[in-house]
Amino acid sequence: MTPQPDPQAGAAVKAADRAHVFHSWSAQDLIDPLAVAGAEGAYFWDYEGNRYLDFTSGLVYTNIGYQHPKVVAAIQEQAGKLATFAPAFAIESRSEAARLIAERTPGDLDKIFFTNGGAEAVENAIRMARLHTGRPKVLSAYRSYHGGTQTAINVTGDPRRWPNDNGTAGVVHFWGPFLYRSAFHAETEEQECERALAHLEQTIAFEGPASIAAIVLETVPGTAGIMPPPPGYLAAVRELCDRHGIVMVLDEVMAGFGRTGKWFAAEHHDVVPDLLTFAKGVNSGYVPLGGVAISAKIAETFATRPYPGGLTYSGHPLACAAAVATINVMADEGVVEHAARIGETVLGPGLRELAERHPSVGEVRGTGVFWALELVRDRETREPLVPYNAAGQAAAPMAAFGAACKKNGLWPFVNMNRTHAVPACNITEAQAKEGLAALDAALAVADEHTAA
Ligand code: PLP
């Protein structure tokens, strides 16, 4: 699978990158991007001949792994047939992708507005909610990420918002449920759920329900820490939204398309939002695609009134052909059920077993192929292994952990004091165990930074 090393070619790729590519979220002179020569399935490799098991799925989006032959062939076939066509027309791959997505989204979310990615999906969901309600304000949670464009970054609840926060977007943040670091001094899931709901209810009351267009929530907050909500929380948020005429937006850009072991995470909670945003796993990111699944009620608002939003590449034929092929592969190969099983039988038990042996692991949480390990200095006090939003020397223990993973052939997802185990949904049992073994070795490095 891994081709012959070619360091010279790698050096040329790296040199052009450093000269001309301006990278996201980075101080340009302080980064050292790995030159990647290729990828297949759950692995990728560099030009030096090093192969890595990808426990990040790119940016948590290659749900069927790299280079799935059926999806690659579908893109090639679509390119030969109709490589592009404007969004105002009915195109076979676009119609079919919309049908397959609508068939899988919960409830009456039967109309699909296509975008090029997740942030645009969130932008458009909020625009729809504001137009539908005639209200300006949006509530969203701390410890969340919704994208890098203007409105999406303003609803985000992590430090990436701070330098972009212009205060004009009408966004109010609240605390969602997160028992391990409870904002409500809760000691049980039930308390956390009840208190988080009381807090949200009060936030709505004090912001003025009649000014609130939408509550935007990741069904399972992802980048911010993979925090599955306690049973009953989302159903109660649904009820609050109904009571106050607020649009419920569930962001499933990361949680959707199999990651939690269901097609959509909302299914775990028996909740149907008014709008559901998706991207990433919809076609494993082989061609950029995202979108908003729209309820009948909101679609009706735009039945005779034009929707004032659009994108040149909305529902791009290549992206939609990739979505059709990906969804069919996931259905034919039982990828969603596999993700649920690997979470229950391998990743969940394996990560919990690591937590028993490594004092640096404060908590393990997740489902399917969507797991977080909270690394701590001290299990009793739950002091994070590195401070919130630490950089440079302050983040050194996590950097050492990450380097140890890579040395052991694992490409880790590292965010603040957490590592996330988020491999492809179709990772095999043997590959998952290989990842656990590499994590085991790297956690020994993290353990050196604990108080134990
Ligand atoms: N929403 C969620 C929950 C995400 O995780 C992300 C990206 O990580 C986004 C939105 C933004 O998606 P994109 O980067 O495709 O714009």
Image (tube, helix red, strand yellow):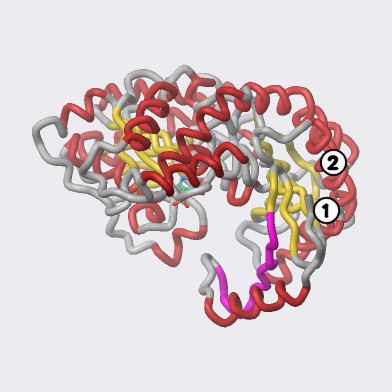
Residue at image position (57%, 82%) is 19
Mark 2 in CB contact with mark 1 (< 8 angstroms):
yes
Secondary element under disc 2, as helix, strand or loop, is helix
Horizontal and vertical percent position of residue 74: 50, 40
Seen in the image, is 194 located left or right of residue 408? left
Read off the residue under disc 2: 434
Residue at image position (42%, 25%) is 105
Looking at the picture, which amino acid does disc 2 mark? Answer: Glu
The answer to whether residue 221 is visible is: no
Seen in the image, is 349 located left or right of residue 205? right
Name the disc covering residue 270, or none. Answer: none
Mark 2 sits near ligand 1, with its Cβ under 8 Å away: no
Read off the residue under disc 1: 409
The CA span between labels 2 and 1 is 9 Å
| Image: 407 above or below 258 | below
| Image: 408 above or below 303 | below
Horizontal and vertical percent position of residue 37: 70, 62
Secondary element under disc 1, as helix, strand or loop, is loop
Q: Reply yes or no: does residue 29 show up in magenta.
A: yes
Closer-to-camera residue (440/96)? 96
Horizontal and vertical percent position of residue 298: 23, 29
Region in magenta:
26-38
Task: Count residues near mark 1 (Cα–Cα under 10 Å), then give few for <14, some for 14-19, many for 20+.
Answer: many
Q: Residue furthest bottom?
A: 19
| Earlier-in-chain disc, 2 versus 1 | 1
Residue at image position (45%, 59%) is 161
